[in-house]
Structure formats: C-alpha cells, structure tokens
Amino acid sequence: MAYQGRYQNGKAKSSGGVWKTVLIVILCVVLILSALFAAGYFFLESKLGKITQAKFEEKDVSGQDLSALIGNLDETEPSVPVTEEPTTEATTEATTEPTTEATTAPTEPDYGQSGKIVNILVVGQDSRPDGGGEDEAKLADTIMLMTLNKETRTLSMTSFLRDSYVKLPEYYRGHTCGWNRINTSYALGYVWYGDAGAMEMLNLTLEGNYGVKVDGNVEIGLVALWDVIDYMGGVEVELDEDEYNYLKPIEEYCNNYYVGSGELERITDIQIGVNTLSADLALNYARMRHATASDNDMNRAARQREVLASMLNKATKMSPLELNDLIDLVLSKIITNISTDDMKMYIKELTPYLYDLQLVSYQIPAEGTYWGEMVELPDGVGGVLKIDFAKNKQVVAAIQNGEEVPTFK
C-alpha cells in the first residue's frame, strides 16, 4: 500500500539548513538515561531549570487567514467497507452479570503517581519564531508517542504519519476546527495560543481520533538535532543499495564543503551495509522518503525510529561525564509542558523500570488501515491518508495495554 509523499527531501546542513527536523525523544536521553548513568535524581534536579516551559499566549489572529490550517469544516469521517465479522465478546461482557471470581481478582501493583502507562509525545517541529517580526507556524514534522508500560517493561515508539487526514478538535477554546493533515494541528494550536496551545491541540487531536491520552509533551527543533548527533559522533544504521545511492551524492556534497572549510575530520565514506552516519547524513537518512519510486512516508517513519534506537543505544554506552555534557547541550533547546515537579517525579518513578527495557516500534495508521486519496483543501488539492479509525483505535489500545497488536490486510 504505497503512498507517495508530497515533499522532496531537504539538503545537508552545510547547504544552508534547508533540511527539516526529524525525530528525537530527547526526553529519553536527557531524563531517563541521566537518571541511570549520572547519579540520578539529585544530579538532574539542578539542571531541570534549563528546560523551557511551554506557555499559553493568546494571540491576535484577526488579520490572518487560517483556513489552510483549519481545513475542511464540512468533511465527514470516511466510510470504510466492512471486511470482518464483528465479535460478540463485547456484547457478552456487557450483558453478563459480573462473577465472584472477577471481583476477587489480584490487586494490581502500586505503580506510583505516574501509573502503569506513561505516554510522552515528542514532536520534531520544522520552524520556530525568529525572535523578530511575525511568528512562523510550527508544523509537526515528526510526531512520535513514547509509551512506557511498567508492567511489561516495554518502551513503544509509535509514529503518527504526518499526512494522516484527521478531525481536529471540533471546538477548541472558542474556535471551530475542521479536517486536515495531522501536522497542521500543532501549527494551528501554536498560532492561537503559543507553545502550550500547540501541544494541547495535538493532544486533543490524538485523543479524539485514536483514543490515546498524552501525559506530557516534548518539542525539539532543528539545531538541537544536528548538535546531538554530531556530539555523539554519528549514529550507526544499515544502508541498503537504494539508500546508499540516495545518500552518496549528499555525502560528496558534504565532503566537498568540509574540505573547503578545512574540517577534514568530518569527511565520511559510506558503504552498503552498516555505517556510522555523520549528523548531516543521519538527518537526511531520517528524512528520506524518495530513495526509490516506491519509497514512502511509512519507510521514512521506520528510518526515524531506527535512528532513535541507535542514538539510545549509543547513549547507554556514554560515560557519566560525556552524558553530562550532552545534557547541558540539549536541555536549553527543549520545550515541554511537563512541570519541573512532574519531571522529578518521572525520574524517580521510571528509573527502576528501565533496566532490561524492551524497545518496540509501530506506525499509525497501521498497515492495511488506510488509503491514499486526493482531497480539496483550502489551499488547493493535496494528497492525504484516509484512515479506518476504528481499526487504528484497536491498534493503539493494544499498544497501550501491552497486548498483542492486531494486524490487518
């Protein structure tokens, strides 16, 4: 079920920063790994003040045309043909009197204030205000939900594809919304109410369409991504022939730039197979969606998760001193709506669950639950992913509960 994306890849950082941001759950690197390798709670407590707290800022949008972000106001949920017989389990459960056995089930362990499931939504955004003049919109270039299940000791990385055609909150703080691509939800909330509005708007969009509750949000922008990967000395990924052919011209461009600037230590020579990609190449790899004619946004999301897993693996091998420097590098570039007190609570409560943590990855919409379609949007006709929301709610619920995730053809 190939779906061709709408955007061409950007260029390497050395070409002027045209590339956009990709994934990163710096929350994991900064909050979790620091707790494991750098003296934990008391060490990080002194550093949390460097993180920027998201704020609500009601903005005057009277002179702006927001129809392109709001999308279609008269759209309805797409009709999906019934391909499977409905089960009777839900009906039986609803009409049967609870048994004595059910009421005497074992008591669930005490998982603390944060509960059994913790959902942190990480957004890589592709623009930010320049500090002067009109604010730019913040499109959510990457949307990744990190779900820590304490019972199963599993960290699930769920990518929400940015071309997903979803219903924005029907009525948000006095504003009427419509249907649009999911990444516009972040931009619309930001235009109305700043960073905290962007996070709240996207959280409501995910809850309304997929039934997921977000506990906290982390945003990271362009410069931090390159800086972190560069500080780590690159990330290890395996390139197939098509990916190699796509990245080789970019590598040559970067190498020529670094030769001209005298930074010979940055010269790379990639091959088919396992490579340590520099920051430039890693960002282009994670942005890649046109390596072949059949490449798509789903492959792009999978590459992003691969880069993330590689970064997390590399961070676990860093010394406390190296990790301390990484934390100082990153903290000032993060925006979050997680309060300092809640961050301290998460560090304290989540650390015991991180040993032998299993890392798994998913995408939403799931394979077999969506189709590509051209729709009329306020800014013109564009390609989107139409979605079977009922099936995707099943997938999301299974991920959240640590159950077997259903598959669809």
Image (cartoon, rainbow, N blue to C red):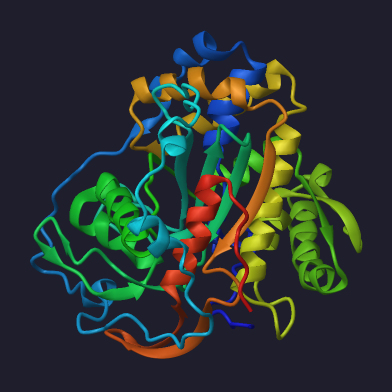
Q: Quadrant of residue 39?
A: top right
State whether residue 101 is above or below residue 376.
above
**Of 16 and 251, the residue lying toward us:** 251
Q: Is residue 266 above or below residue 42?
A: below
Where is residue 74 shown, x and y percent of the image?
20, 84
Q: Can residue 28 be seen by looking at this rendering?
A: yes
The quadrant of the picture occupied by the N terminus is bottom right
Is 85 rendered above or below residue 316?
A: below
Say left or right for 272 vs 71.
right
Q: x%, y% of residue 310?
A: 74, 44
Q: Is residue 364 left or right of residue 127?
A: right
At which x and y percent is residue 198?
30, 52
Q: Residue at x 67, y 18 (%)?
A: 37
Image mark count: 0
Residue at 44% over, 38% down: 102
Decide if residue 331 is on the left or right side of residue 207: right
Front-most of 112 and 276? 112
* Residue 288 visible in image: no
| Residue situated in front as seen by the camera: 106 or 66 | 106
For the C terminus, give its image quadrant: bottom right
Front residue (pair 15, 78): 78
Rendered location of residue 104, percent (x, y): 44, 30
387 over 143 or under it: above or below:
below
Residue 335 in the figure: left or right of residue 359 = left
Q: Residue at x 69, y 60 (%)?
A: 303
